[in-house]
């Protein structure tokens, strides 16, 4: 019993001690940012999506017809999409309306992307959406139309016995 | 009597009433009203409902797709575990069947979620026993599994990935290599967990023969999941009533006879290994093919009912959906494992010391939001 007690405690310490010398796995966030390859997209023809991160949306304004299906899909989920009037000349958009997304409400489920029959609303790997003013969380169609720049180049790597971000 | 916060009520004599919770002094969002006589607990009255949000009623005003993001909120930590039975029940009502590949991917996601959920529990259990290393390690390693699940599901926890008719998107191309690499790493890591925590005499002294649930009590009180298996009953819905394609994979049901807090711990640790074994087998079995049966237009069910029982991370998750042929389901009833395990908690706490309360409470893997729905 006594031998078991001492060997158990020493064994626990030994494992903890060994781990001090391993590379730590913490992502040092503002200096390091994760590399996320692609955003979630959906192909309306085959009715299946392609794997990707569900971040901020991207709206292809030239393809949007203002059909409001994204807003209808969101209606009972987060109710965060509003169809708003946009300025300019849009040949395939007779009512000149496009989605405006409130990221204070969005749950990033991506069902609006599934609902879009014209492949014009997708998601991007952009996840840094925090702002200092609540009203800035509402992204207008033109804000959504900008493709985010790639920020990170760090990946989570597992070698034998060690996991780290590099 | 003021009931808010941690008021202490004098019951006369040596007895005191102590409110634990509902805002997280080691209880989760849930209040436990404990009567103590000196150092011993003589009465425990759980008071769930603090995070009740009416998920069942909300489900009656949403269609079959819109329900998915809402129904995974109660257990975001086990998002696939809670939505999979809903989707299986909805499929019975809409009368579609998912293709074989979709069934396999669902199994992968369900097992990944089980690992994520168990690792979260392990971290919390470690910190409540005062072992902060055991909080850091599982939380860090959980990130690896979240990374794998994210590469399929798109988000870290709430994937909304399983839909009636199949799954939303295919697996990424290099998923198999990445998953096997992670499992190799984590299998070595489990051995380290055992040395620093599970075989550590300081931990075993706090959990062994604490909160013993006998086999007869476990059946009588209707306990499910790992807690039932730790009491010596090899009951697992994946084996008893195979759903998806669980009958094609070979895995063991870890059981223990003791029924104490330590047994519940070690059963969950062994389940991590079994989940990884299932994913490995599925990755060998899976073949290219369609991932979704396309349903045109709005999903409308035939009038009728559907019952589905699956094994979520915390135990048996049961859904009963009634449809009257409308766009929205008429009734969605969820019977959650946490609520059943709550009954066992009262039974275990009475008679134990107050200092053993965290060791018993967290060994049950009780998730207040799931119980309240």
Image (spheres, rainbow, N blue to C red):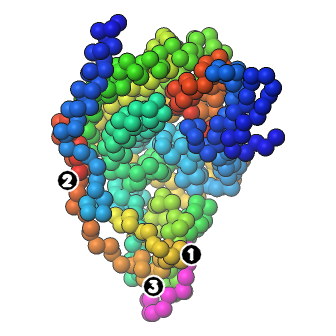
- Asked if residue A68 shows in the view, the reply is no
> Which tag is nearer the camera, tag 2 or tag 3?
2
Q: Magenta residues, as a range?
A: A81-92
Q: Residue A82: say if magenta.
A: yes
How far apart are the two marked residues, 2 and 3, measured between alpha carbons? 46 Å
Q: Which residue is under mark 3?
A: A92
Quadrant in which residue B372 is drawn:
top right
The mark closer to the camera, 2 or 1, is 2
Residue B142 vs residue B161, the one in the foreground: B142
Mark 2 residue element: loop
Q: Chain of mark 2?
A: A
SS of the residue under disc 3: loop
Q: Position of residue B263 (x, y in %)?
A: 46, 18
The residue that label 2 is drawn on is A166
Between the C-alphas of marks 2 and 1, the distance is: 40 Å
Residue B85 left/right relative to A146: right
Seen in the picture, residue A94 relative to A112 is either above or below; the reply is below
Proximity of marks 1 and 3: CB atoms separated by less than 8 Å: no
**How many numbered marks are there?**
3
- Mark 1 sits on what residue? A82
Q: CA distance from mark 1 to mark 3?
A: 19 Å
């Amino acid at each position: 019993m006594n031998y078991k007690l001492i060997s158990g405690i020493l064994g626990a310490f030994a494992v903890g001690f060994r781990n001090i010398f391993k590379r730590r796995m913490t992502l040092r966030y503002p200096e390091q940012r994760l590399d996320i390859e692609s955003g979630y997209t959906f192909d309306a023809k085959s009715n299946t999506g392609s794997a990707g991160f569900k971040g901020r949306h991207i709206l292809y304004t030239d393809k949007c017809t203002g059909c409001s299906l994204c807003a209808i899909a969101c209606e009972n989920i987060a109710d965060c999409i509003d169809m708003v009037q946009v300025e300019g000349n849009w040949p395939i958009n007779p009512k000149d309306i496009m989605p405006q997304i409130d990221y204070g409400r969005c749950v990033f489920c991506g069902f609006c992307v599934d609902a879009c029959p014209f492949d014009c609303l997708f998601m991007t790997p952009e996840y840094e959406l925090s702002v200092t003013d609540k009203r800035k969380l509402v992204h207008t169609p033109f804000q959504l139309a900008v493709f985010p720049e790639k920020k990170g180049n760090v990946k989570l790597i597992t070698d034998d016995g060690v996991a780290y971000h590099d | 009597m003021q009931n808010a916060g941690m008021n202490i009520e004098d019951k006369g004599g040596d007895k005191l009433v102590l409110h634990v919770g509902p805002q997280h002094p080691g209880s989760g969002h849930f209040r436990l009203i404990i009567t103590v006589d000196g150092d011993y607990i003589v009465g425990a009255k759980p008071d769930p409902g603090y995070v009740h949000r009416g998920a069942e009623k909300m489900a009656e005003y949403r269609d079959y797709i819109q329900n998915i993001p809402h129904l995974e909120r109660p257990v975001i930590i086990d998002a696939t575990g809670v939505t999979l039975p809903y989707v299986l029940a909805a499929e019975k009502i809409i009368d579609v069947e998912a293709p074989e590949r979709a069934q396999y991917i669902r199994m992968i996601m369900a097992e990944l979620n089980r690992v994520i959920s168990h690792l979260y529990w392990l971290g919390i259990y470690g910190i409540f026993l005062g072992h902060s290393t055991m909080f850091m390690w599982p939380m860090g390693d959980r990130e690896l599994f979240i990374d794998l699940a994210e590469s399929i599901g798109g988000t870290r926890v709430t994937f909304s990935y399983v839909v009636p008719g199949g799954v939303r998107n295919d697996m990424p191309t290099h998923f198999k290599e990445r998953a096997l690499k992670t499992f190799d790493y984590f299998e070595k890591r489990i051995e380290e967990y055992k040395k620093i925590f599970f075989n550590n005499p300081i931990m075993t002294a706090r959990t062994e023969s604490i909160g013993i649930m006998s086999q007869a009590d476990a059946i009588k009180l209707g306990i499910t999941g790992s807690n039932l298996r730790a009491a010596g009953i090899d009951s697992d819905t994946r084996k008893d009533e195979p759903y998806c394609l669980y009958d094609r994979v070979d895995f063991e049901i870890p059981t223990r006879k003791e029924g104490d807090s330590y047994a519940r711990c070690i059963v969950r640790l062994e389940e991590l290994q079994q989940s990884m074994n299932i994913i490995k087998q599925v990755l060998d079995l899976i073949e290219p093919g369609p991932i979704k049966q396309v349903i045109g237009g709005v999903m409308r069910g035939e009038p009728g009912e559907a019952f589905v029982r699956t094994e979520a991370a915390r135990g048996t998750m049961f859904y009963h959906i009634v449809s009257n042929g409308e766009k929205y389901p008429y009734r969605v009833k969820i019977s959650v494992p946490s609520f059943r395990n709550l009954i066992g908690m009262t039974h275990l706490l009475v008679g134990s010391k107050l200092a053993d309360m965290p060791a018993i409470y967290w060994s049950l893997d009780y998730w207040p939001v799931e119980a309240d729905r």
